[in-house]
Image (cartoon, helix red, strand yellow):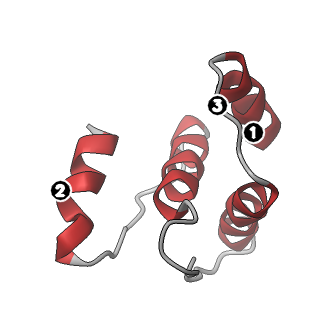
């Protein structure tokens, strides 16, 4: 599974990623490919959770991991709900 597959799958269900969200997913995957981490950060409400979940889904489908998600306690329950 890659970013294009995910975009196609989301689009077929009526969901569309914005350009900055696709760029964020690709950045996360590039960091992993080069063996280092990074911090995905921007203003509130621009889709970091969505980008993170998609990147984790792609990495998991490739048998890569484990991964760690660091987030404020105020959004921890949201992450749990989205990933489970």
Task: Point out the frontmost of discs 2 and 1.
Answer: 2
Distance, label 1 to label 3, CA atoms, is 17 Å
- What residue sits right under mark 2 in the picture? 77
| 78 displayed left or right of 39 | left
Judge the density around disc 2: few (<14), some (14-19), many (≥20) Cα neighbours within 10 Å: few
The spot of residue 6 in percent (x, y) is: 69, 33
The spot of residue 79 in percent (x, y) is: 29, 54
The N terminus, quarter of image: top right
Q: Element under label 2?
A: helix
| Picture disc at residue 27 | none
* Mark positioned earlier in the residue sequence (1 or 3): 1
Image: 69 above or below 43: above
Residue at the image point whose x is 17% and y is 74% from the top: 73
- What residue sits right under mark 3 in the picture? 15
In this rendered view, identify the residue nearer to me: 5 or 50.
Answer: 50
For the residues labelled 1 and 3, say whether their Cβ atoms are less than 8 Å apart. no
In this rendered view, identify the residue nearer to me: 57 or 12.
Answer: 12
The C terminus, quarter of image: top left
In this rendered view, identify the residue nearer to me: 77 or 36.
Answer: 77
* Mark positioned earlier in the residue sequence (3 or 2): 3
Image: 58 above or below 49: above
Distance, label 3 to label 2, CA atoms, is 23 Å
Q: Element under label 3?
A: loop
| 10 displayed left or right of 43 | right
Residue at the image point whose x is 25% and y is 66% from the top: 75
Task: Point out the frontmost of discs 1 and 3.
Answer: 3
For the residues labelled 2 and 1, say whether their Cβ atoms are less than 8 Å apart. no
The spot of residue 77 in percent (x, y) is: 17, 56
Judge the density around disc 1: few (<14), some (14-19), many (≥20) Cα neighbours within 10 Å: some
Residue at the image point whose x is 58% and y is 56% from the top: 51
- What residue sits right under mark 1 in the picture? 2
């Amino acid at each position: 599974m890659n970013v294009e597959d995910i975009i196609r799958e989301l689009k077929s269900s009526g969901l569309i990623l914005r350009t900055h969200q696709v760029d964020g997913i690709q950045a996360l995957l590039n960091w992993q490919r080069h063996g280092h981490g990074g911090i995905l950060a921007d203003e509130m409400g621009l889709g970091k959770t969505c980008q993170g979940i998609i990147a984790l889904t792609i990495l998991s489908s490739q048998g890569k991991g484990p991964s760690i998600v660091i987030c404020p306690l105020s959004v921890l329950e949201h992450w749990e709900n989205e990933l489970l």
